[in-house]
Amino acid sequence: MQFQIQQDIQPQLKLSKKVQLMLCCPLCHSKLELYREDYQCQNPECKTNFPIKNGIPILIDEKSSIFSIEDFLNERNTFFDLSPKNPFLEALKSLIPEISLNIKSRKNYNHFAEILLSLSTHPKVLVIGGSILGQGTETIVDNPKIELVETDISFGSRTIIICDAHSIPFANNSFDGVIVQAVLEHVVDPWQCVEEIHRVLKDDGLVYAETPFMQQVHGGCYDFTRFTYLGHRRLFRKFEEIDSGAVCGSGMALAWSYYYFLLSFTKSKFWRKIITFFVRITAFPFKYFDYFLINQFGTLDAASAFYFMGKKSKQILTDQELIKLYKGAN
């Protein structure tokens, strides 16, 4: 059933008019039109309808996603647990030291923003996995010249579109930049997701990614892949490298290994909470070694996570060229 456009009863969307015009069908990449209650693909052979929930379009290709549109209409937990938290426990938790430490994000995002603004006066940046604020992203978020389009497969305080990175619902050459921080380990096909990132970027568009290497499973059933330094570089083989390296070091990797070693002894929620408390007050000093180790050659063989910043390219890095980029200590 089709609806006639009626501006007075259209849902209030969280995305700007300009971003709405950039949207496309995640199934066939054809134009979308906003009708009374949903978006509809204008391809006669597709004509798929995509609903809107609380002002957020749900643009999911159910054939290429592990999620369904019903998951979001019914507000099921798709990645983050959206159930209410105990404020007392959350306050107590905030007083206990973390075992994780991201050394370079803030500096990298400063660099990313500088390059973006040198290429465009008002760049548009797609954030994949952007339902919550990414670590170190303040430079990007607080800059009024940079327009962020924050998407995720979870509802969150910053989500303006629900979509799956395997089929990004934007036209070719739409964005000046894409941010994909701590996401690619949680997708079933990271290579397809990077292909999609390449497609939606403009010809001189930038990508910034952070992806774990030495980290245990987090995110439960939504955790699939890890990358070495060279494996991460190959993932972005269609991009010209601007910068890359370790973003979380081997000290953090050691703390995580110690933590998960102890967790492996029990499935009891009570004892796992006790272990979490114990580890956070005994293992947090390990992360501070990373201030010294982060730029050491050996860290590239043992880092907790890597970053890559690059520019969309027409050249493809060959595997013969790839292995010459090894910078580890072995």
Image (cartoon, rainbow, N blue to C red):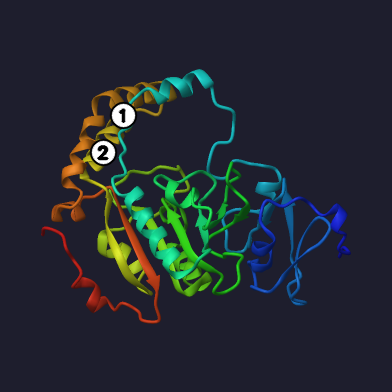
- Which residue shows up at 55% across the image and 26% down it? 85
- Badge number at residue 207: none
- Which residue shows up at 31% across the image and 69% down it? 241
Indicate the position of residue 204 as horizontal and vertical percent values. Answer: 44, 74
User: Taking the image as drawn, is residue 233 in sight?
Assistant: yes
Residue holding disc 2: 257
Q: Is residue 280 left or right of residue 94?
A: left
Indicate the position of residue 256 as horizontal and vertical percent values. Answer: 28, 38
Residue holding disc 1: 265
Under mark 1, the amino acid is Phe
- The relative height of residue 278 versus residue 71 in the rendered view (above or below) is above
- The relative height of residue 97 versus residue 177 in the rendered view (above or below) is above
- Which residue shows up at 65% across the image and 66% down it? 23
> Which mark is in front, 2 or 1?
2
- The relative height of residue 45 versus residue 296 in the rendered view (above or below) is below
Mark 1 closeness class: few <14, some 14–19, many ≥20 residues within 10 Å = few
User: Taking the image as drawn, is residue 25 in sight?
Assistant: no
Q: Earlier in the sequence, mark 2 or mark 1?
A: 2
Indicate the position of residue 207 as horizontal and vertical percent values. Answer: 42, 64
User: What's the CA distance linking mark 2 and mark 1?
Assistant: 13 Å
- The relative height of residue 294 versus residue 23 in the rendered view (above or below) is above
Most extreme residue toward the bottom, as rendered? 314
- Which residue shows up at 30% across the image and 49% down it? 104
Q: Secondary structure at mark 1?
A: loop
Most extreme residue toward the top, as rendered? 88
Q: Secondary structure at mark 2?
A: helix
Tag 2 near tag 1, CB within 8 Å: no
Mark 2 closeness class: few <14, some 14–19, many ≥20 residues within 10 Å = some
